[in-house]
Image (cartoon, grey):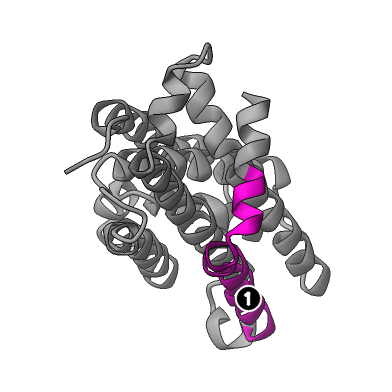
Amino acid sequence: MLTIAYSELTQILRDRTAFFTSLIMPVAASIYFIYNRDLFLGDRGLGYIAVLLIFTIAAFSLYSTVVTTLAARRQNLFLKRLRSTAASDPAILSGLVLPVSLISLAQVGLILVAFAVVTDLPANIPLLVVAIVATFIMMLALGMATAGLTNSSERAQITTLPVSLGIITVGIWVGVTGTESLSLIKRLLPGGSATELIMHAWNGGSSIGDSLLLLAPTLAWVVASIALAARLFRWEPRR
């Protein structure tokens, strides 16, 4: 797995276009959100900015890159060649997505540290970490599922849009309007409860019981995303 991961990291660093669009641009967008945070705050608290930062990295640095990577490796038969080796299927997939997953986690960690330095520390760091990990696992699994429906790396620019823009739209909707109205619908949407959980973790004011309730829909989406990935992912090139 580590050999595959090292090879994949090398390819990511060599592909300047993918490196810029999938890894540098989300960081630039995050810096913009931090620098212009007063334009977005309103009465929503710093947690709303944290949601924008986390979801931007999850949607573009992680999800979109995973889809593009897996679609490209399947298209050039690299996945098929790897399956002829002694490596197991889980080891192959883990090795291919490990570099981008670690890079995305490092990105969100550094960005949130910078955000906390220029503003305030989050009220509940362990809860924030749980929310980030759950969101990233969900987006990683959705990336594998989307890759199963994507026949080329070029096509990935289109197939990733519904999920990447959808998750950010949900985060903005829930973050701006709150959950006083349509609370069940908002919390059941992918990213909805995670948005509220992140805002509570940063702003404070939420009990442990409320946080656990918010964690349940997020974990349900994690399970659903993994099941979807197992069903839709393909090793052979799509026609």
The residue that appears at 57% across and 80% down in the rendered structure is 41
Work out whether residue 184 or residue 107 is closer to the camera in this orientation and state it: 107
Q: Residue furthest left?
A: 239
Label 1 residue SS: helix
Q: What secondary structure prevails in the magenta region?
A: helix
Please tell me whether residue 7 is drawn above or below residue 87 in the rendered image.
Answer: below
In the rendered image, the quadrant that contains the C terminus is top left
Please tell me whether residue 231 is drawn above or below residue 41 in the rendered image.
Answer: above
In the rendered image, the quadrant that contains the N terminus is top right
Give the percent coordinates (x, y) of residue 170: 35, 62
Work out whether residue 67 or residue 41 is closer to the camera in this orientation and state it: 67
Query: What residue did someone put label 1 on?
Result: 28
Range shown magenta: 9-36
What amino acid type is highlighted by mark number 1? Answer: Ala
> Is any atom of residue 128 visible in this view?
no
The residue that appears at 43% across and 45% down in the rendered structure is 139
The residue that appears at 67% across and 27% down in the rendered structure is 2
Give the percent coordinates (x, y) of residue 202: 65, 57
Give the percent coordinates (x, y) of residue 70: 42, 42
- Asked if residue 104 is among those painted magenta in the image, a careful observer would answer no
Please tell me whether residue 170 is drawn above or below residue 239 in the rendered image.
Answer: below
Q: Is residue 27 left or right of residue 176?
A: right
- Asked if residue 11 is among those painted magenta in the image, a careful observer would answer yes
